Amino acid sequence: MKNYSLILLALVFFVGCKDTPKDDIKETAEVKTYTINQFMANENAFANGFSPDKSRVLMTSNRSGIYNMYTVPTEGGEFLPVTQSDSASVYGISYFPEDERILFRMDGNGDEIFKIFLKDSSGIKRLTPEKNVRALFQGWAKDGKSFYYSSNERDPQAMDIFEMDVASFNTKLIFKNVDAMDFGGISADKNYMLLSKSINTNDSDLFLLNLKTNEKTKINETVSKNSPADFSPNNKSFYYTTDADAEFSYLMKYNIEDGSKEKVLEKDWDINAFYFTHNGKYQVMFTNEDAKTKMYVTEVATGKEVDFPEIDGQAINGASFSRDETMALLTVGSSQLPTNTYSYNIASGEYHKLTDVLNNEINPDDLVEATVVRYKSFDGLEIPAIYYQPKQASATNKVPALVWVHGGPGGQSRQGFSSFIQYLVNHGYAILAVNNRGSSGYGKTFFQMDDQNHGDKDLKDCIAGKDWLASQDYIDKDKIGIIGGSYGGYMTMAALTYAPEEFEVGVNIFGVTNWIRTLNSIPPWWESFKDALYLEMGDPNTADSVRLKQISPLFHTENVTKPLMVLQGAQDPRVLKIESDEIVEGVKKNGVPVEYVVFDDEGHGFVKKENEIVAYGRILKFLDKYLKGENKLNSEAEKADSTEVN
């Protein structure tokens, strides 16, 4: 599905420092502006589950500057460090179901070659192979005696499924993935496995594999998007979502014994996820409603929807339940406030705040709540977007603006909190995060509108977004730039090369610039997605290469006339560093300002706070200089100057 795709992944900027001199804060139209250090002092923390006795919660947090694991009492209190890495980030998975041991994962500074590790009283032990083998946790067995994981140790291009016993740590191969399938879950009785096979970036076939007989049954009858959800607690059926004969994904039930199907629930938006809690007491569903997650929890026995508390007027956008189903960990946030975690006692209704991630130096009243807007593109198509308007903007104090393009192709700009976006808005930049045609969340017709049309109509949607901004009373129509990461970085470069007079500046964050090379160098563990991606983008080994070259900004750098900033992680396995090296070299020849920032210890997305501080602080300085107009360059020699930071 397009959301996973290679170039992909919309950038989500989180984060969080403490004492900053008062001189770093200034008043602007009754809004205090804050430094990048203050915004990056926002913490990003998320829960990895309860301890077996529910007295503590395992947390992953970047409060140390990179991600490490901590524990916190279930009723709130002090974070106690479990790991203290100062180089590679550590991401918690969970406690063991019946004891205090902990699973976690690490990669090599963003190379995405993850390993699974054990933390116990004796120290840390790596459980999966060390060299060039990627392993991902796929869930605990129902009895808690083993867990499942996927790994490409047999074949770099095949993510096989293994089961590891937690007493001996012996492993066994339970599914040899010779057909580039994607794992979708195992029934509690270990008799069945769900698998999917990508057809294109929207559609996939769904299969039920009998692990006893090795018989594989295809579930869907038409070409459609089919995603496994969960097995029923009694192992007699399973649930999945599909958009067969519909624009949006709805929930279906398949009865294993007779192969019959029934529609369970349909919404006016995509149903993104559905699962049962450990013993089947509750069923949990998530929908994507106009770029905002909504959660529905139902008590299975009664069919009644479970009410959750409204906390600080914010939305509950996620929940994970204890194995005994008496408690839940809730994630609560908004576009204006970062996400916090709460523990919740379902019977008593009592909840406790476990995190307080907003830097206490930042007044939340100085932050901006996003609004959903819609505008018409060049052909009349309605384009949804998420809009952030600076509080200091007015008809007499017009502000510069940026069109923000998400990752993908097929990602979605959502109504969530971003420290980086809030930092830019706080400093007087309006942000319009466009969901151009090809974005997910608005129906499959909209989703497929950019297939093999990239850099054309999707770019025109972004230009129409610029035109919408220019029509707003509070926007300086002569000061609108474009910014994006991954596929959004590609769109930034497409704008500067194919529509060079539309935007005043561009900020390309590890964006694709040579589609032929990128499509030929996708990581081997994404073999199951490759054909689907080729169907959408084009196959670089066929005549499609002619069009792919035409839409690759690297081959048209002579057209770039506006200031450019490029940021790149040297360990990025998706968009190789050479992509950014070459685009910078090409644009420099035009004598336009180019700034290049490279981080040797980052991959596809910056996760270390010291690097985020440098990256986002440099972006603001670049925008202040070349878009807002502060510190205007005085000579042609200065205009041709460029910088590179490693």
Image (cartoon, helix red, strand yellow):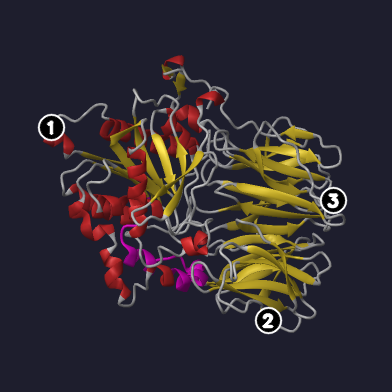
Residue at image point 47% right, 48% down? 11
**Type of amino acid at the residue the image marks with label 2:** Thr
Front residue of this view, candidates 361 and 365: 365
**Type of amino acid at the residue the image marks with label 3:** Asp
Look at the image and tell me in which quarter the C terminus lies: top left
User: For numbered disc 3, what is the local secondary structure?
Assistant: loop
Query: Mark 2 and mark 1: span between their CA atoms?
Result: 69 Å
2 or 3: mark nearer the eye: 2
Compare marks 2 and 3 and give the one earlier in the sequence. Answer: 2
**Type of amino acid at the residue the image marks with label 1:** Ser
**Residue 611, image x, y percentages:** 43, 39
2 or 1: mark nearer the eye: 2
Q: Is residue 321 left or right of residue 498?
A: right
**Residue 303, image x, y percentages:** 83, 55
**Residue 384, image x, y percentages:** 46, 49
Instruction: Residue under label 2, please give it.
Output: 217
Residue at image point 29% right, 36% down? 477
Please indicate, yes or no, whether residue 329 appears anywhere in the rendered image: yes
The boundaries of the magenta stretch are 510-533
User: For numbered disc 2, what is the local secondary structure?
Assistant: strand
Compare marks 1 and 3 and give the one earlier in the sequence. Answer: 3
- Asked whether residue 523 is drawn in magenta, I would say yes
The disc label shown at residue 635, or none: 1
Instruction: Residue under label 3, please give it.
Output: 324
